[in-house]
Image (cartoon, grey):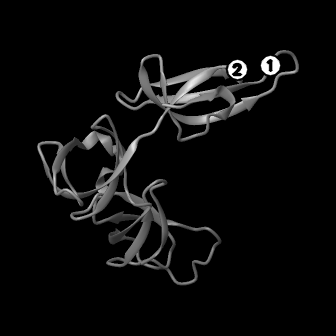
């Protein structure tokens, strides 16, 4: 595995640090008036989700880990486990539903997601950035309500509550950004 300097750490990099695998969430490069420059890095443990703030000087060497990314198709959920199938080998794997966290409701039958593996252990899963959902409940459109940036609450078919523009009505399909969990556009 390649070693990189402390000042080369970028958000999204996966590092082997203190005997664990950590993802760099936030990186701030600091150059104090006195002393050498360093990178203040917020790390998230990929196995248990704990967070750690660490300083890396530019002379420090850290081990960068490359994760293998595989497309997996969602089949079904059973006892809190999500069952996926590898599109190439047709192997089925089970992953805990907690791996998706608050984005779990956006997972739909047959959806293809990217699962990141390290030594055949699934560490992370990412949904497509945009997903089409149906609005099942929202307030009716009020004529003349044209105030800038006025949004109203809407409940989607997966139970998630998002804020939508006033022109979106009930039973309409909308596109939701799965990273921010916000309304993106009409479908």
- Which residue is located at x 62 percent, y 34 percent? 9
Which quadrant: the C terminus? bottom left
Which circle's residue, 1 or 2, is located before the other in the chain? 1
- Pick the front one: 139 or 69: 69
Query: Seen in the image, is 23 located left or right of residue 149?
Result: left
Quadrant of residue 28 within the rendered picture: top right
Where residue 60 sits in the image (x, y, percent)? 65, 20
Element carrying mark 2: loop
- The answer to whether 143 is drawn above or below residue 83 in the figure is below
Question: For the residues marked 1 and 2, what is the alpha-carbon distance in whole angstroms?
Answer: 10 Å
Residue extending furthest right?
33
Where residue 106 sits in the image (x, y, percent)? 32, 58
Mark carried by residue 137? none
Q: Which residue is mark 1?
A: 36
In front: mark 1 or mark 2? 2
Element carrying mark 1: loop
Kindly indicate whether the residue at mark 2 contacts the one at mark 1 (C-beta within 8 angstroms): yes
Mark 1, residues whose alpha carbon is within 10 Å: few (<14), some, or many (≥20)?
few
Query: Seen in the image, is 119 located left or right of residue 92?
Result: right
Mark 2, residues whose alpha carbon is within 10 Å: few (<14), some, or many (≥20)?
few
Quadrant of residue 148 within the rendered picture: bottom right
- Pick the front one: 132 or 66: 66
Where residue 162 sits in the image (x, y, percent)? 43, 60
Mark carried by residue 59? 2
């Amino acid at each position: 595995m390649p070693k990189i300097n402390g000042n080369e750490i970028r958000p999204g990099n996966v590092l082997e640090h203190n005997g664990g695998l950590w993802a760099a969430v936030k990186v701030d490069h600091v150059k104090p008036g006195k002393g050498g420059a360093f990178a203040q890095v917020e790390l998230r443990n990929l196995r248990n989700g704990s967070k750690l703030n660490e300083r890396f000087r530019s002379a420090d060497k850290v081990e960068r880990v490359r994760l293998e990314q595989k497309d997996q198709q969602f089949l079904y959920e059973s006892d809190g486990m999500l069952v996926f199938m590898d599109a190439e080998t047709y192997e089925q794997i089970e992953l805990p539903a907690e791996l998706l966290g608050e984005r779990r409701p956006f997972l739909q039958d047959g959806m293809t997601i990217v699962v990141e593996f390290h030594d055949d252990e699934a560490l992370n899963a990412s949904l497509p950035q945009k997903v089409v959902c149906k609005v099942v409940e929202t307030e009716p459109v009020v004529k003349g309500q044209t105030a800038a940036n006025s949004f109203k609450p809407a409940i989607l078919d997966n139970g998630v509550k998002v804020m939508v523009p006033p022109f979106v009505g009930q039973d309409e399909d909308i596109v939701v950004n799965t990273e921010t969990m916000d309304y993106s556009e009409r479908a």
